[in-house]
Image (cartoon, helix red, strand yellow):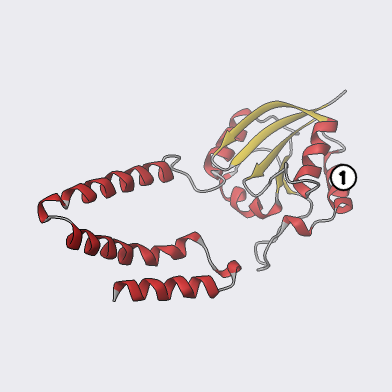
Amino acid sequence: MTAVVNLFLFAALHLTAESLVDMRHTANFFPLLMLSMFAVFTLTMRRKLLFIPVLILAVFHTSTLFLTYAPLAKPGDWVRVASYIEAWEQPGQPIMLYPAGSFPSITIHYHGINSLAALPRGYDIKIQEPYNPADETESLLIESLTKQTTNHQRLWLVTTWECTPDDGRTPCRIAEDFFNQHYEAERDINLFRSRVRLFRRRI
């Protein structure tokens, strides 16, 4: 019976649109898989030896919990991002966020002296629409970068795990090239799934 339920759930996930399936949805498999494994162990092993697979599973489960939650932070680690910037910032150093989808998160934790700006456009949390950096055009991004950085000698840039600058001519790569061309990094720190840099304009 357990195997039948497992197969049914697997088929349901396989036939569901990929955009509707996330890693957390596989949690439904866990208790059923455990029951299936112990059923196999019970049929194929002596009762006295059952502690061996139980011990192995306990070790792996504990290790997974430690590795998953060791950072003690949510993706983006906005508490540490905000604290780091507040500790090192000076007046007149605006904070740019890219992709713009991270804007609502940092506004909750940042209480410093500088302004926050999302690239390439503002982000309204009241508008319930998916944010996709790939929808941004190169001209829009360059225009926004030029406009928001023109009058500043130093500025902060916060990027998240959504930004993959190595994937060809993506918006992330365009933004990285812009900052590398016009600025040089004075501070650079990687936090949990986020990166914080303080840039100084090249002379």
In the depicted view, which residue is nearer to us: 188 or 20?
20
Instruction: Looking at the picture, tell me which residue is in the foreground, 168 or 132.
Output: 168
Q: At numbered mark 1, what does the secondary structure look like: helix, strand or loop?
A: helix
In this image, 83 relative to 157: left or right?
A: left
Residue farthest to the left? 48
Q: Which residue is drawn at 33% across and 72% down?
A: 3
Q: Which residue is nearer to you in this view: 161 or 153?
A: 161
Residue 127 percent across, percent down from the top left: 68, 67
Looking at the picture, how far across and down is residue 199, in whole percent? 75, 30
Mark 1 is surrounded, within 10 Å at the Cα level, by few (under 14), some (14 to 19) or many (20 or more) other residues, namely: few
Rendering coords of residue 18 (x, y %): 59, 67
Where is residue 101, by image quadrant?
bottom right
Please tell me whether residue 125 is drawn above or below residue 50 in the rendered image.
below
- Residue 84 image-quadrant placement: top right
Q: Does residue 175 appear left or right of residue 124 in this picture?
A: right
| Residue depicted at 70% across the width and 52% down the height | 100
Q: Could you tell me which residue is drawn at 75 percent across and 46 percent down?
A: 172
* Res 43 quadrant in image: bottom left
The N terminus, quarter of image: bottom left
What residue sits 70% from the left and 50% below the top? Answer: 99
Q: Position of residue 158 (x, y in %)?
A: 67, 41
In this view, the residue in front, 31 or 47, is 47
Residue bearing mark 1: 147
Identified by mark 1, the residue type is: Lys
Q: In this view, does 104 lie to the left or right of 42?
A: right
